[in-house]
Image (cartoon, helix red, strand yellow):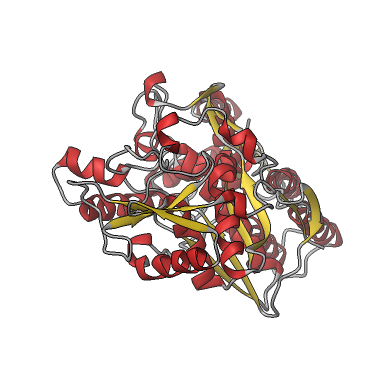
């Protein structure tokens, strides 16, 4: 039984798809005016694993994953706010807003591809859904949930008594900290924009029944979620920072327009800090994914994308994640142990003897899968599942070192389990893992062949009784980070672990 923590009820509950054969999940996507940062990685790797597990757990259901690309819409409702972030970046670069959008959308997907994040089934943009947004505004005006002022349209929160149900914040709580000028044309400071009039010189603008303007930020997700997933979605996800006001506003406008529940289950991922501090350009700790992959300051060496993915999975998706050099180093070692073991299994399977797997290795695989899935069934606990996979890796190495019952069939079954749990679900094991030998650090095939040659030479020295020279080779390889294991039939090698 899959149980998920629903932010709406603040408790674990059994997940049951609304419709037979279909699961709809919507996740708030990036606003594309700059390169993606490590906070984006935390969110989208987390939801990638959730989507992967839903597809695994419900094989007879079609899981439609919708993740928007925000190319228009302000993040505030201030009446004098001027251009939005995409428009401001376009002015800064001296190019068209849609050039900004295309440039950074491509950049975003490049980074997600590097992290082995599966592409969404649909990546809609609000600029392509202006008619639908105008239509829902008309609906809300007709139902008395919105009002128009000087070419702008606002949602009237007083018309929706359930407002604040998700975040637990009352309307009065929201007044605190509201800028005075933001309420000048509103009936209530907590009212939010559905449509904003375009001031002179505002680049991104469309015609509407209320004059030229542009949609509010919150409206886009309501429109695109209902268009592609129906009036009620199974799951809506996003960062915890979006719970209020963004998700709260989505619920109000959507349910006021349709009269039906907007989302059955709300999932929110935790935020990222950098060595205990909130990430920000002013603090000098703002890290884009491209800078992280290149090892640019404040980092002192490149971060392999799959290491970053592993690091993200070491914490529960709802938990905060602290990015640090020590944590990355631990993740590099942890992933390296799995990769090297997969490499070892795949290499040995090419030479394994015929025969059925022993009862011991079969039992280990069955127990591992059972424990792994139990962790994932507990609110997509990838961190717990990763711990199970790490324990399995340790036991597999002990089995390989023992030299007992290592048949080709057994090795192939172990490899398949890594593909299933570490690949299909967690996304840290791929078809390429281990195919070229040592993976913990990128290793050319030439290095692999040289190590094999030294191991063969050492074996020849031992057979000739020249143990001192054989020990020299072992010691020199150890200094280079290569560990030898002398078995009853052959000597195997792997990078030192831990």
- The image shows residue 302 at horizontal and vertical percentages of 39, 33
Residue 485 lies left or right of residue 135; in this view the side is: right
Q: Is residue 60 visible?
A: yes
Residue 390 lies left or right of residue 44; in this view the side is: right
Q: Is residue 412 visible?
A: no
Work out whether residue 312 or residue 140 is closer to the camera in this orientation and state it: 140
Work out whether residue 351 or residue 443 is closer to the camera in this orientation and state it: 443
- The image shows residue 426 at horizontal and vertical percentages of 61, 54
Q: Quadrant of the C terminus?
A: top right
Residue drawn at point x = 22 percent, y = 47 percent: 202
Residue 447: name its quadrant. Answer: top left
Q: Quadrant of the N terminus?
A: bottom right
Residue drawn at point x = 58 percent, y = 42 percent: 244
Work out whether residue 348 or residue 438 is closer to the camera in this orientation and state it: 438
Q: Would you place residue 260 above or below residue 238 in this image?
A: below
- The image shows residue 134 at horizontal and vertical percentages of 39, 66
Residue drawn at point x = 46 percent, y = 44 percent: 186
Residue 251: name its quadrant. Answer: bottom right
State how many labels appear. Answer: 0
Work out whether residue 269 or residue 180 is closer to the camera in this orientation and state it: 180
Q: Residue lying furthest top in this view?
A: 283
- The image shows residue 439 at horizontal and vertical percentages of 50, 45
């Amino acid at each position: 039984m899959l149980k998920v923590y629903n932010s709406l009820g603040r408790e674990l509950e059994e997940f049951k798809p609304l419709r037979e054969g279909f699961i709809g999940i919507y996740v708030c996507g990036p606003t594309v005016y700059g390169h993606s940062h490590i906070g984006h990685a935390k969110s989208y790797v987390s939801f990638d694993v959730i989507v992967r597990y839903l597809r695994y757990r419900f094989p007879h259901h079609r899981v439609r994953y919708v993740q928007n690309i925000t190319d228009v819409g302000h993040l505030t409702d201030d009446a004098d706010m001027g251009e939005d972030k995409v428009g401001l970046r376009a002015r800064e670069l001296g190019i068209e807003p849609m050039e900004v959008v295309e440039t950074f959308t491509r950049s975003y997907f490049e980074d997600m591809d590097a992290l082995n994040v599966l592409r969404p089934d649909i990546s809609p943009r609000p600029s392509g859904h202006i008619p639908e947004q105008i239509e829902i505004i008309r609906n809300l005006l007709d139902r008395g949930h919105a009002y128009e002022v000087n070419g702008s349209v606002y949602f009237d929160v007083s018309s929706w008594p359930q407002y604040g149900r998700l975040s637990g914040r009352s309307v009065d709580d929201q007044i605190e900290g509201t800028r005075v000028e933001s309420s000048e044309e509103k009936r209530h400071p907590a009212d939010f924009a559905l449509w904003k009039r375009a001031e002179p010189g505002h680049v991104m603008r469309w015609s509407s029944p209320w004059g030229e303007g542009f949609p509010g930020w919150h409206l886009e997700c309501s429109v695109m979620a209902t268009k592609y997933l129906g009036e009620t979605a199974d799951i809506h996800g996003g960062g915890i920072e979006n719970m209020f006001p963004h998700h709260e506003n989505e619920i109000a406008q959507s349910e006021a327009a349709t009269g039906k529940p907007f989302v059955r289950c709300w999932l929110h991922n935790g935020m990222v800090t950098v060595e205990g501090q909130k990430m920000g350009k002013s603090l000098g700790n703002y890290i884009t994914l491209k800078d992280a992959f290149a090892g640019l300051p404040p980092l002192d060496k490149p971060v392999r994308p799959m290491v970053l993915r592993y690091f993200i999975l070491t914490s529960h998706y709802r938990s905060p994640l602290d990015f640090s050099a020590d944590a990355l180093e631990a993740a590099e070692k942890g992933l390296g142990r799995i990769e090297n073991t997969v490499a070892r299994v795949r290499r040995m399977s090419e030479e394994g003897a015929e025969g059925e797997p022993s009862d011991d290795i079969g039992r280990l695989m069955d127990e591992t899968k059972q424990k792994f899935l139990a962790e994932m069934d507990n609110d997509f606990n990838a961190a717990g599942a990763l711990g199970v996979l790490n324990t399995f890796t340790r036991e597999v190495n002990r089995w390989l070192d023992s030299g007992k019952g290592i048949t080709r069939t057994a090795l192939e079954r172990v490899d398949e389990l890594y593909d299933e749990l570490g690949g299909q679900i967690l996304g840290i094991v791929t078809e390429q893992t281990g195919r070229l030998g040592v993976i913990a650090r990128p290793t050319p095939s030439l290095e692999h062949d040289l190590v094999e040659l030294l191991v063969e030479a050492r074996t020849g020295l031992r057979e000739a009784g020249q143990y001192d020279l054989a020990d020299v080779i072992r010691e020199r390889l150890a200094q280079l980070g290569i560990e030898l294991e002398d078995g009853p039939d052959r000597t195997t090698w792997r990078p030192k672990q831990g």
